[in-house]
Image: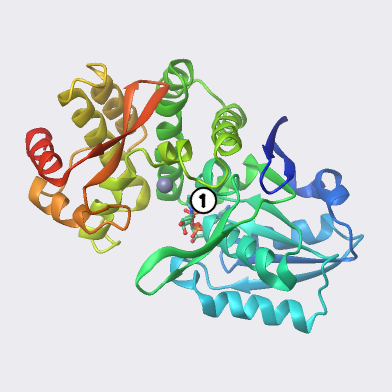
Amino acid sequence: MNRVTCETAKKNNTYDITIGNNLLKNADKYISRFIKGKKVAIITDSNVAPLYADILKDALSAYQVFTFIFPAGEASKNFSTINSIYSFLCENDFTREDTLIALGGGVTGDMCGFAAATYLRGVPFIQIPTTLLSDVDSSVGGKTGYDLPCGKNLIGAFYQPKAVLIDTDLLTTLKPETVSDGMAEVIKTALLSDKDMFDLISEKQLDLTEMITRCVHFKSTIVQADELDSGIRGILNLGHTFGHAIEKLGNYKTYSHGQGVAIGTVIACKIGEKLGLTKKGIADLAKNTFEAYGLPTLPPYSAQEIFGALKNDKKANSSGIKLVLLNDIGSAFLHQTDFDTLEKLLTEVI
Ligand SMILES: NC(=O)c1ccc[n+]([C@@H]2O[C@H](COP(=O)([O-])OP(=O)(O)OC[C@H]3O[C@@H](n4cnc5c(N)ncnc54)[C@H](O)[C@@H]3O)[C@@H](O)[C@H]2O)c1
Ligand SMILES: [Zn+2]
Protein backbone atom coordinates (compact mmCIF):
# COMPACT_ATOMS: atom_id res chain seq x y z
CA MET A 1 0.00 0.00 0.00
CA ASN A 2 1.29 3.45 -0.94
CA ARG A 3 0.34 6.92 0.19
CA VAL A 4 0.68 10.26 -1.61
CA THR A 5 -0.20 13.60 -0.02
CA CYS A 6 -1.72 16.46 -1.99
CA GLU A 7 -1.46 19.90 -0.42
CA THR A 8 -3.69 22.53 -1.95
CA ALA A 9 -2.99 25.85 -0.29
CA LYS A 10 -5.68 28.06 -1.87
CA LYS A 11 -8.53 25.85 -0.82
CA ASN A 12 -6.69 25.18 2.41
CA ASN A 13 -6.90 21.43 2.29
CA THR A 14 -4.35 18.65 2.48
CA TYR A 15 -5.44 15.13 1.73
CA ASP A 16 -4.02 11.67 1.46
CA ILE A 17 -4.38 9.43 -1.54
CA THR A 18 -4.08 5.78 -0.48
CA ILE A 19 -3.30 3.26 -3.22
CA GLY A 20 -3.26 -0.53 -2.94
CA ASN A 21 -5.31 -3.68 -3.24
CA ASN A 22 -8.03 -5.08 -0.97
CA LEU A 23 -8.86 -1.61 0.37
CA LEU A 24 -12.61 -1.26 -0.29
CA LYS A 25 -13.54 -4.02 2.17
CA ASN A 26 -11.63 -2.14 4.85
CA ALA A 27 -12.64 1.34 3.75
CA ASP A 28 -13.58 2.35 7.31
CA LYS A 29 -9.94 1.93 8.35
CA TYR A 30 -8.80 4.48 5.79
CA ILE A 31 -11.61 6.99 5.64
CA SER A 32 -13.57 6.97 8.91
CA ARG A 33 -11.38 9.66 10.45
CA PHE A 34 -12.66 12.03 7.73
CA ILE A 35 -16.31 11.27 8.42
CA LYS A 36 -17.52 13.66 11.11
CA GLY A 37 -21.30 13.12 11.08
CA LYS A 38 -23.43 9.98 11.31
CA LYS A 39 -24.65 9.93 7.72
CA VAL A 40 -22.86 8.97 4.54
CA ALA A 41 -24.26 9.17 0.98
CA ILE A 42 -22.64 6.86 -1.57
CA ILE A 43 -23.06 8.40 -5.03
CA THR A 44 -22.54 5.75 -7.69
CA ASP A 45 -23.71 4.62 -11.13
CA SER A 46 -25.80 1.71 -12.37
CA ASN A 47 -22.77 -0.38 -13.43
CA VAL A 48 -20.69 0.14 -10.30
CA ALA A 49 -23.51 -0.15 -7.74
CA PRO A 50 -24.21 -3.89 -8.21
CA LEU A 51 -20.49 -4.66 -8.10
CA TYR A 52 -19.24 -2.59 -5.19
CA ALA A 53 -21.87 -0.53 -3.34
CA ASP A 54 -22.70 -3.27 -0.81
CA ILE A 55 -19.03 -3.93 -0.05
CA LEU A 56 -18.56 -0.26 0.80
CA LYS A 57 -21.84 -0.12 2.73
CA ASP A 58 -20.78 -3.13 4.84
CA ALA A 59 -17.40 -1.55 5.53
CA LEU A 60 -19.19 1.58 6.79
CA SER A 61 -21.66 -0.23 9.04
CA ALA A 62 -20.91 2.22 11.86
CA TYR A 63 -22.76 4.90 9.85
CA GLN A 64 -26.21 5.41 8.46
CA VAL A 65 -25.49 4.82 4.78
CA PHE A 66 -27.69 6.07 1.90
CA THR A 67 -27.03 5.14 -1.71
CA PHE A 68 -27.86 7.26 -4.76
CA ILE A 69 -27.59 5.44 -8.12
CA PHE A 70 -27.77 7.18 -11.52
CA PRO A 71 -27.71 5.60 -15.02
CA ALA A 72 -24.05 4.98 -16.00
CA GLY A 73 -22.47 7.10 -18.72
CA GLU A 74 -21.45 10.60 -19.76
CA ALA A 75 -25.06 11.33 -20.83
CA SER A 76 -25.99 11.44 -17.11
CA LYS A 77 -23.38 14.12 -16.33
CA ASN A 78 -25.93 16.93 -16.39
CA PHE A 79 -27.86 19.26 -14.14
CA SER A 80 -30.83 16.93 -13.96
CA THR A 81 -28.69 14.30 -12.16
CA ILE A 82 -27.12 16.95 -9.92
CA ASN A 83 -30.58 18.23 -9.03
CA SER A 84 -31.68 14.69 -8.14
CA ILE A 85 -28.63 14.36 -5.87
CA TYR A 86 -29.57 17.64 -4.11
CA SER A 87 -33.15 16.37 -3.59
CA PHE A 88 -31.87 13.02 -2.32
CA LEU A 89 -29.61 14.75 0.24
CA CYS A 90 -32.35 17.14 1.31
CA GLU A 91 -35.00 14.40 1.65
CA ASN A 92 -32.60 12.42 3.83
CA ASP A 93 -31.81 15.47 6.01
CA PHE A 94 -28.12 15.67 5.16
CA THR A 95 -26.33 18.44 7.02
CA ARG A 96 -22.88 19.99 6.69
CA GLU A 97 -21.59 17.40 9.15
CA ASP A 98 -22.42 14.54 6.79
CA THR A 99 -20.23 13.12 4.04
CA LEU A 100 -20.64 12.20 0.37
CA ILE A 101 -18.59 9.41 -1.19
CA ALA A 102 -18.05 9.18 -4.95
CA LEU A 103 -17.84 5.48 -5.83
CA GLY A 104 -17.27 5.30 -9.57
CA GLY A 105 -15.37 6.64 -12.56
CA GLY A 106 -14.76 10.24 -13.59
CA VAL A 107 -18.43 10.90 -14.31
CA THR A 108 -19.40 9.95 -10.75
CA GLY A 109 -16.45 11.75 -9.15
CA ASP A 110 -17.02 14.99 -11.07
CA MET A 111 -20.74 15.10 -10.23
CA CYS A 112 -20.46 13.97 -6.62
CA GLY A 113 -17.69 16.54 -6.10
CA PHE A 114 -19.83 19.31 -7.59
CA ALA A 115 -22.84 18.34 -5.48
CA ALA A 116 -20.55 18.34 -2.42
CA ALA A 117 -19.12 21.76 -3.35
CA THR A 118 -22.54 23.35 -3.66
CA TYR A 119 -25.03 21.56 -1.36
CA LEU A 120 -25.34 23.76 1.76
CA ARG A 121 -22.38 25.75 0.30
CA GLY A 122 -20.10 22.78 0.80
CA VAL A 123 -20.15 19.39 2.52
CA PRO A 124 -17.17 17.02 2.84
CA PHE A 125 -16.62 14.37 0.19
CA ILE A 126 -14.33 11.42 -0.41
CA GLN A 127 -13.27 9.94 -3.75
CA ILE A 128 -13.22 6.18 -4.27
CA PRO A 129 -12.41 5.96 -8.00
CA THR A 130 -13.18 2.75 -9.87
CA THR A 131 -11.69 3.29 -13.36
CA LEU A 132 -8.03 3.64 -14.28
CA LEU A 133 -8.74 7.14 -15.66
CA SER A 134 -10.32 8.25 -12.40
CA ASP A 135 -7.51 6.63 -10.37
CA VAL A 136 -4.75 8.52 -12.17
CA ASP A 137 -6.51 11.69 -13.24
CA SER A 138 -9.97 12.85 -12.19
CA SER A 139 -10.03 11.81 -8.51
CA VAL A 140 -7.08 14.05 -7.66
CA GLY A 141 -6.96 17.81 -8.10
CA GLY A 142 -10.43 19.02 -7.18
CA LYS A 143 -11.96 19.75 -10.59
CA THR A 144 -15.65 18.97 -10.27
CA GLY A 145 -18.59 19.71 -12.54
CA TYR A 146 -21.02 18.62 -15.20
CA ASP A 147 -21.79 19.05 -18.90
CA LEU A 148 -24.13 21.45 -20.70
CA PRO A 149 -25.85 20.46 -23.97
CA CYS A 150 -23.45 22.85 -25.77
CA GLY A 151 -20.22 21.48 -24.28
CA LYS A 152 -18.50 19.22 -21.77
CA ASN A 153 -17.50 20.34 -18.27
CA LEU A 154 -18.81 23.88 -18.78
CA ILE A 155 -20.15 24.16 -15.24
CA GLY A 156 -17.84 23.42 -12.35
CA ALA A 157 -16.04 24.30 -9.18
CA PHE A 158 -12.63 23.63 -7.67
CA TYR A 159 -13.38 21.57 -4.58
CA GLN A 160 -10.89 19.18 -3.05
CA PRO A 161 -11.87 15.84 -1.50
CA LYS A 162 -11.03 15.00 2.11
CA ALA A 163 -9.39 11.74 1.03
CA VAL A 164 -8.92 9.51 -2.01
CA LEU A 165 -8.98 5.71 -1.72
CA ILE A 166 -7.73 3.80 -4.76
CA ASP A 167 -8.32 0.04 -4.65
CA THR A 168 -6.65 -1.57 -7.66
CA ASP A 169 -8.82 -4.70 -7.29
CA LEU A 170 -11.78 -2.69 -8.58
CA LEU A 171 -10.14 -2.43 -12.00
CA THR A 172 -10.56 -6.17 -12.66
CA THR A 173 -14.20 -5.72 -13.69
CA LEU A 174 -13.54 -2.96 -16.24
CA LYS A 175 -14.07 -3.53 -19.95
CA PRO A 176 -10.70 -3.77 -21.77
CA GLU A 177 -11.46 -0.57 -23.73
CA THR A 178 -12.04 1.36 -20.48
CA VAL A 179 -8.64 0.16 -19.21
CA SER A 180 -7.05 1.25 -22.50
CA ASP A 181 -8.60 4.69 -22.16
CA GLY A 182 -7.00 5.05 -18.73
CA MET A 183 -3.66 3.82 -20.10
CA ALA A 184 -3.65 6.74 -22.54
CA GLU A 185 -3.66 9.13 -19.55
CA VAL A 186 -1.00 7.02 -17.81
CA ILE A 187 1.33 7.20 -20.85
CA LYS A 188 0.60 10.93 -21.21
CA THR A 189 1.55 11.38 -17.54
CA ALA A 190 4.75 9.36 -17.99
CA LEU A 191 5.77 11.55 -20.96
CA LEU A 192 5.22 14.64 -18.81
CA SER A 193 6.83 13.19 -15.71
CA ASP A 194 10.17 11.46 -16.32
CA LYS A 195 12.12 9.09 -18.55
CA ASP A 196 12.52 6.42 -15.89
CA MET A 197 8.74 6.12 -15.44
CA PHE A 198 8.18 6.23 -19.19
CA ASP A 199 10.68 3.41 -19.81
CA LEU A 200 9.22 1.23 -17.04
CA ILE A 201 5.71 1.70 -18.45
CA SER A 202 6.87 1.07 -22.02
CA GLU A 203 8.51 -2.15 -20.84
CA LYS A 204 5.42 -3.05 -18.74
CA GLN A 205 7.52 -3.39 -15.63
CA LEU A 206 5.39 -1.51 -13.11
CA ASP A 207 2.64 -3.22 -11.16
CA LEU A 208 -0.70 -1.39 -10.95
CA THR A 209 -0.13 0.08 -7.49
CA GLU A 210 3.28 1.44 -8.44
CA MET A 211 2.08 2.80 -11.79
CA ILE A 212 -0.94 4.56 -10.28
CA THR A 213 1.17 5.91 -7.39
CA ARG A 214 3.65 7.52 -9.76
CA CYS A 215 0.84 9.10 -11.81
CA VAL A 216 -0.94 10.42 -8.73
CA HIS A 217 2.31 11.75 -7.30
CA PHE A 218 3.00 13.65 -10.52
CA LYS A 219 -0.53 15.04 -10.75
CA SER A 220 -0.42 16.15 -7.09
CA THR A 221 2.84 18.02 -7.70
CA ILE A 222 1.28 19.94 -10.60
CA VAL A 223 -1.97 20.62 -8.71
CA GLN A 224 -0.01 21.90 -5.73
CA ALA A 225 1.90 24.30 -7.99
CA ASP A 226 -1.19 25.59 -9.82
CA GLU A 227 -4.36 24.54 -8.05
CA LEU A 228 -6.69 26.86 -9.96
CA ASP A 229 -5.32 26.00 -13.42
CA SER A 230 -3.94 29.36 -14.47
CA GLY A 231 -0.54 28.20 -15.73
CA ILE A 232 1.53 25.04 -15.40
CA ARG A 233 -1.53 22.77 -14.79
CA GLY A 234 -2.26 23.30 -18.50
CA ILE A 235 0.52 20.82 -19.39
CA LEU A 236 -1.78 18.00 -18.20
CA ASN A 237 -3.63 18.63 -21.47
CA LEU A 238 -0.80 17.16 -23.55
CA GLY A 239 -2.40 15.69 -26.70
CA HIS A 240 -5.87 16.88 -25.68
CA THR A 241 -6.34 19.73 -28.20
CA PHE A 242 -5.86 17.35 -31.12
CA GLY A 243 -7.55 14.53 -29.19
CA HIS A 244 -10.71 16.58 -28.66
CA ALA A 245 -10.77 17.43 -32.39
CA ILE A 246 -10.58 13.71 -33.25
CA GLU A 247 -13.30 12.82 -30.72
CA LYS A 248 -15.50 15.57 -32.18
CA LEU A 249 -14.91 14.53 -35.82
CA GLY A 250 -16.08 11.03 -34.87
CA ASN A 251 -19.18 12.48 -33.16
CA TYR A 252 -17.84 11.17 -29.82
CA LYS A 253 -18.64 7.62 -30.99
CA THR A 254 -15.86 6.48 -33.32
CA TYR A 255 -12.96 7.48 -31.05
CA SER A 256 -12.93 7.37 -27.26
CA HIS A 257 -11.23 10.06 -25.18
CA GLY A 258 -8.15 7.86 -24.59
CA GLN A 259 -7.84 7.01 -28.28
CA GLY A 260 -8.04 10.73 -29.12
CA VAL A 261 -5.37 11.51 -26.51
CA ALA A 262 -3.04 8.82 -27.90
CA ILE A 263 -3.34 10.06 -31.50
CA GLY A 264 -3.24 13.70 -30.33
CA THR A 265 -0.10 13.22 -28.23
CA VAL A 266 1.79 11.73 -31.16
CA ILE A 267 0.69 14.67 -33.35
CA ALA A 268 1.91 17.12 -30.66
CA CYS A 269 5.30 15.35 -30.46
CA LYS A 270 5.66 15.39 -34.26
CA ILE A 271 4.83 19.11 -34.38
CA GLY A 272 7.38 19.78 -31.63
CA GLU A 273 10.01 17.86 -33.59
CA LYS A 274 9.12 19.78 -36.81
CA LEU A 275 9.58 23.06 -34.92
CA GLY A 276 12.95 21.86 -33.60
CA LEU A 277 11.64 22.22 -30.03
CA THR A 278 11.16 18.53 -29.20
CA LYS A 279 14.11 16.14 -29.12
CA LYS A 280 14.11 13.95 -32.25
CA GLY A 281 12.70 10.48 -31.73
CA ILE A 282 10.20 11.31 -28.95
CA ALA A 283 7.21 10.99 -31.31
CA ASP A 284 8.31 7.45 -32.24
CA LEU A 285 8.86 6.48 -28.59
CA ALA A 286 5.40 7.77 -27.68
CA LYS A 287 3.81 6.03 -30.69
CA ASN A 288 5.41 2.66 -29.83
CA THR A 289 4.26 2.83 -26.21
CA PHE A 290 0.65 3.79 -27.02
CA GLU A 291 0.56 0.95 -29.57
CA ALA A 292 2.01 -1.52 -27.05
CA TYR A 293 -1.14 -0.87 -24.99
CA GLY A 294 -3.50 -1.30 -27.95
CA LEU A 295 -4.09 2.41 -28.55
CA PRO A 296 -4.29 3.90 -32.07
CA THR A 297 -1.74 6.50 -33.12
CA LEU A 298 -2.46 7.24 -36.79
CA PRO A 299 -4.63 10.32 -37.44
CA PRO A 300 -7.85 9.01 -39.01
CA TYR A 301 -8.73 12.41 -40.51
CA SER A 302 -6.95 14.82 -42.86
CA ALA A 303 -4.92 17.79 -41.59
CA GLN A 304 -7.69 20.10 -42.92
CA GLU A 305 -10.42 18.24 -41.04
CA ILE A 306 -8.46 18.28 -37.77
CA PHE A 307 -7.57 21.95 -38.22
CA GLY A 308 -11.24 22.81 -38.89
CA ALA A 309 -12.37 21.02 -35.74
CA LEU A 310 -9.78 22.56 -33.41
CA LYS A 311 -10.18 26.10 -34.72
CA ASN A 312 -13.52 26.09 -32.90
CA ASP A 313 -12.08 24.49 -29.75
CA LYS A 314 -13.18 26.37 -26.64
CA LYS A 315 -9.50 26.71 -25.62
CA ALA A 316 -8.67 28.57 -28.86
CA ASN A 317 -8.38 32.36 -28.69
CA SER A 318 -8.51 35.00 -31.42
CA SER A 319 -4.76 34.87 -32.05
CA GLY A 320 -4.46 31.10 -32.15
CA ILE A 321 -4.11 28.31 -29.65
CA LYS A 322 -1.73 27.25 -26.88
CA LEU A 323 -0.25 23.81 -27.51
CA VAL A 324 1.40 21.59 -24.92
CA LEU A 325 4.76 20.49 -26.32
CA LEU A 326 7.67 18.50 -24.90
CA ASN A 327 11.33 19.53 -24.96
CA ASP A 328 12.06 15.99 -23.91
CA ILE A 329 10.37 13.32 -21.83
CA GLY A 330 9.79 14.92 -18.41
CA SER A 331 9.93 18.50 -19.70
CA ALA A 332 6.76 20.07 -21.09
CA PHE A 333 5.86 23.66 -21.90
CA LEU A 334 3.03 25.72 -23.37
CA HIS A 335 3.59 27.07 -26.86
CA GLN A 336 1.35 29.73 -28.39
CA THR A 337 0.87 29.31 -32.13
CA ASP A 338 -1.22 31.23 -34.66
CA PHE A 339 -3.76 29.42 -36.83
CA ASP A 340 -1.86 29.80 -40.16
CA THR A 341 1.29 28.25 -38.67
CA LEU A 342 -0.70 25.48 -37.05
CA GLU A 343 -2.49 24.62 -40.30
CA LYS A 344 0.86 24.41 -42.10
CA LEU A 345 2.40 22.26 -39.35
CA LEU A 346 -0.56 19.86 -39.34
CA THR A 347 -0.25 19.43 -43.12
CA GLU A 348 3.43 18.58 -42.66
CA VAL A 349 2.99 15.96 -39.93
CA ILE A 350 -0.22 14.23 -41.06
N1 LIG B 1 -12.04 16.16 -12.75
C1 LIG B 1 -11.01 15.96 -13.53
O1 LIG B 1 -9.90 16.46 -13.30
C2 LIG B 1 -11.17 15.07 -14.74
C3 LIG B 1 -10.04 14.62 -15.43
C4 LIG B 1 -10.23 13.76 -16.50
C5 LIG B 1 -11.51 13.34 -16.86
N2 LIG B 1 -12.59 13.80 -16.15
C6 LIG B 1 -13.95 13.36 -16.49
O2 LIG B 1 -14.02 11.95 -16.27
C7 LIG B 1 -15.04 11.40 -17.09
C8 LIG B 1 -14.52 10.11 -17.70
O3 LIG B 1 -14.21 9.21 -16.65
P1 LIG B 1 -14.32 7.64 -16.83
O4 LIG B 1 -13.64 7.23 -18.08
O5 LIG B 1 -13.94 7.02 -15.56
O6 LIG B 1 -15.89 7.47 -17.16
P2 LIG B 1 -17.12 6.80 -16.39
O7 LIG B 1 -17.24 7.29 -15.01
O8 LIG B 1 -18.31 6.96 -17.27
O9 LIG B 1 -16.72 5.23 -16.36
C9 LIG B 1 -16.59 4.53 -17.59
C10 LIG B 1 -17.51 3.30 -17.61
O10 LIG B 1 -16.98 2.30 -16.74
C11 LIG B 1 -17.99 1.86 -15.83
N3 LIG B 1 -17.29 1.46 -14.60
C12 LIG B 1 -16.69 2.30 -13.72
N4 LIG B 1 -15.98 1.59 -12.82
C13 LIG B 1 -16.18 0.28 -13.13
C14 LIG B 1 -15.69 -0.93 -12.59
N5 LIG B 1 -14.82 -0.93 -11.58
N6 LIG B 1 -16.08 -2.09 -13.14
C15 LIG B 1 -16.92 -2.09 -14.22
N7 LIG B 1 -17.39 -0.98 -14.80
C16 LIG B 1 -17.02 0.20 -14.26
C17 LIG B 1 -18.91 3.03 -15.67
O11 LIG B 1 -20.19 2.63 -15.24
C18 LIG B 1 -18.93 3.57 -17.11
O12 LIG B 1 -19.84 2.82 -17.89
C19 LIG B 1 -15.41 12.46 -18.09
O13 LIG B 1 -16.67 13.01 -17.76
C20 LIG B 1 -14.33 13.52 -17.93
O14 LIG B 1 -14.80 14.83 -18.22
C21 LIG B 1 -12.44 14.64 -15.10
ZN1 LIG C 1 -7.95 13.34 -20.61
Q: Quadrant of residue 92?
A: bottom right
193 or 275: nearer the viewer: 275
Residue 4 at what x, y percent from top left?
Answer: 69, 32
Q: Taking 99 as reference, is 345 above or below it?
A: above
Report crowding for label 1: few under 14, some 14 to 19, many 20 or more residues within 10 A (C-alpha). Answer: some
Q: Residue at x 53, y 23 (%)?
A: 206
**Disc 1 element:** loop
- Mark 1 C-beta closer than 8 Å to ligand 1: yes
**Colour scheme of this structure image?**
rainbow
Residue 322 at what x, y percent from top left?
Answer: 29, 42
Horizontal side of 215 relative to 297 (left or right) equals right
294 or 145: nearer the viewer: 145
Q: Quadrant of residue 51?
A: bottom right
Horizontal side of 148 relative to 259 (left or right) equals right
Residue 22, visible in the rendered structure: no
The residue furthest front is 319
Q: Amino acid at mark 1?
A: Leu
Instruction: Tell me the quadrant of the picture where the C terminus can be found.
Output: top left
Residue 11 at what x, y percent from top left?
Answer: 68, 49
Q: Quadrant of residue 216?
A: top right
Instruction: Tell me the quadrant of the picture where the N terminus can be found.
Output: top right
Q: Residue at x 18, y 39 (%)?
A: 298
Q: Taking 298 as reference, is 276 above or below it?
A: above
Residue 96, visible in the rendered structure: yes
Task: Name the residue carrying label 1.
Answer: 174
Residue 290 at what x, y percent from top left?
Answer: 33, 33
